[in-house]
Amino acid sequence: MTVPSLASSLSDCVSAAAARLGMADLAPQIRRSEHADFQSDGVLAAARARRRNPREIAAEVVARLSADGRVAAAQVAGPGFVNLDLTDGALLAQLTDRLTDPRLGVGTPEAGVTTVVDYSQPNIAKEMHVGHLRSTIIGDALVRVLEHLGGTVVRRNHIGDWGTQFGMLIQHQVEHPEPTAPQDAGTMRRLATLYRRARADFDADPAFADRARRRVVALQAGDPATVAAWRDIVAESTRYFTEVYDRLGVRLTDADSVGESAYNTALPGLADELERRRVAVTSDGALCVFFDDLRGPDGEPTPLIVRKSDGGFGYAATDLAALRQRVGELHADRLLYVVDARQARHFRMVFDTARRAGWLPPTVPAVHVAFGTVLGPDGRPFKTRAGDTVRLVDLLTEAVDRARDVVAAKNPELAGEALDERARQVGTGAVKYADLANNRVRDYTYDPQRMLALTGNTGVYLQYAHARVRSILARAEGVEATVDPTVGLEPAERALILDLDAFADTLAEVAAGYEPHRLCGYLYRLAQTFTTFYERCPVLRTTGTRRGNRLALCRLTGDTLRTGLHLLGIDAPEQL
Ligand SMILES: NC(=[NH2+])NCCC[C@H](N)C(=O)O
């Protein structure tokens, strides 16, 4: 059975006390506090609603709570807050229960809920860049957390595998058939070159541009040779993306890739339906949806273009078809789109259109899980010195190389494959953590040196904290980590129990706002609290039941750090 957190038990106690005082509507709002173990802020709102003095109500709540054997002290504070301290016995009882709970107090509030998460979404024949990195790792963390909370998650890698650019790519390939050079594994070199040359010819040579346009028509009409060439290009890119996912340790497979092209056959019907329901209207030959509150700088309403005047369909139509399928056929209860914040308007329009069309019931939330831009050292969007987009694989290689130095400096005996593996765990962990630790909507500066620092809010610091706990436990091999609930607690032990206990509530917050940085912040605090505990409270050098209690704290800290890192997609090696 999952053990409810102290905060949630206290919340129930405050609610019960309030209900007996005739205030069943009081929302306790329990949080940790500097002045006591917990603080309840809910009285203020309840008092305001009744035009009563909050301190009076708080005093009544306090009187009720003081009768609870687990409460050591309850006090009115400030304008009407309730401060609560728990007894050592209550904290140790909680620790005892938590030790036998393999779920670390985490329930399954997402059971029965299906979430479709759209993330990663690289484009065929193009390099993956830092934007795709963000989408991939934020999406992966959210998938892991929602699944861990018992939810059903459908991963959707909405790959950009359709569009007019394929005309020029295929045409160029047909006109310049290269000897099928052995593919450089792990690179997109051939396709990137093809892309560059095709684009140059397309811009410089009108005759080639014409042939490329005819090639688009052939592709759309299903001409077998053209379709086969398109498939080859898609397959070559997909192989590369899969390698990147493997390196990142991200759980995206071919089965999760449902590219834009998958919706082609649905588009004409979709457009007809929007027109029939008068959601979309024809304007200058294009089929458009208008929004009264979305206007351009000229004051004209900006439309969502469902069908272009040449009859072609684009990005918006594809997203509408995907959405309709996710709700209608995959029975999504919730839709998430982990995409750059610069696409906010696009998603607003897509979601609004789908609601008007009746494809997105009011009960199904659709959320643009937006993220900010990765900045370079100059504070501008991250580019290479030549002004090109930075290749994600180069960043990973660099991070792993730097991590190898960090790891080797700490472990001179480590070599060969063992060193490589550790460097991979630390390097990719550092990249992921540096991204996830930021509130996702903010821009952040990519700093490979800082992300591999052994101190501060980094992935390495957390991996190191975890490894240290594991080594303490290894040295205590054979000593039982059983809790004696009668031993008094040091302040550092109390703090650690309280932090450990907040794990489940933290995951609930991550899921509520789709905010992995809350888990990062939690783990960082936990590691710091553990460090203080370890400095003040000897574990192996102490004896008797006190040692059992402290080992129990180490074990729970280790398990919580490992599980937390795992939910972020970061490995927690036994040693660092
Ligand atoms: N369903 C979506 N529109 N997902 C986002 C796609 C992102 C697009 N492929 C890009 O690289 O910008």
Image (cartoon, rainbow, N blue to C red):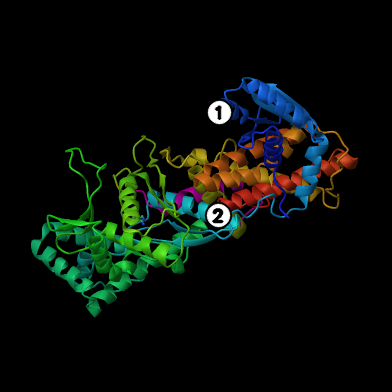
- Is 20 left or right of 47, judged from the image as shown? right
Does label 2 point to a residue whose CB lies under 8 Å from ligand 1? Answer: no
**Amino acid type of the residue tagged 2 in the rendering:** Leu
- Quick check: can you spot residue 184? no
Name of the residue lying farthest toward the left: 207
Residue visible at 78% across and 29% down? 66
Q: Quadrant of ligand 1?
A: bottom left
Q: Position of residue 79 (x, y in %)?
A: 61, 20
Which of the 4 image quarters holds residue 19?
top right
Residue 469 x/y as whole percent? 72, 45
Q: Quadrant of residue 76?
A: top right
> Which secondary structure lies at badge 1?
helix
Does residue 442 show up?
yes
**Could you say which is closer to the camera, residue 278 or residue 72?**
278
Residue 239: percent from left, percent from top: 41, 67
Q: Residue at x 64, y 34 (%)?
A: 23
Question: x and y percent of residue 522 in the render?
Answer: 61, 40
Residue 78 belongs to the span the image colors magenta: no
Image side of residue 379 versus residue 74, left or right:
left
Residues shaded magenta: 389-415
Does residue 116 lie above or below 453 as drawn?
below
Asked if the residue under mark 1 is in contact with the one under mark 2, i.e. CB atoms within 8 Å, the reply is: no
Residue receiving disc 2: 146
Residue 306 higher or lower than 50, as above or below: below
Of residues 574 and 398, the one drawn nearer to the viewer in this rendering:
574
Q: Name the chief secondary structure element in magenta.
A: helix
Between 305 and 278, the residue placed more toward the observer is 278
What mark, if any, has residue 49 been given in the picture?
A: 1
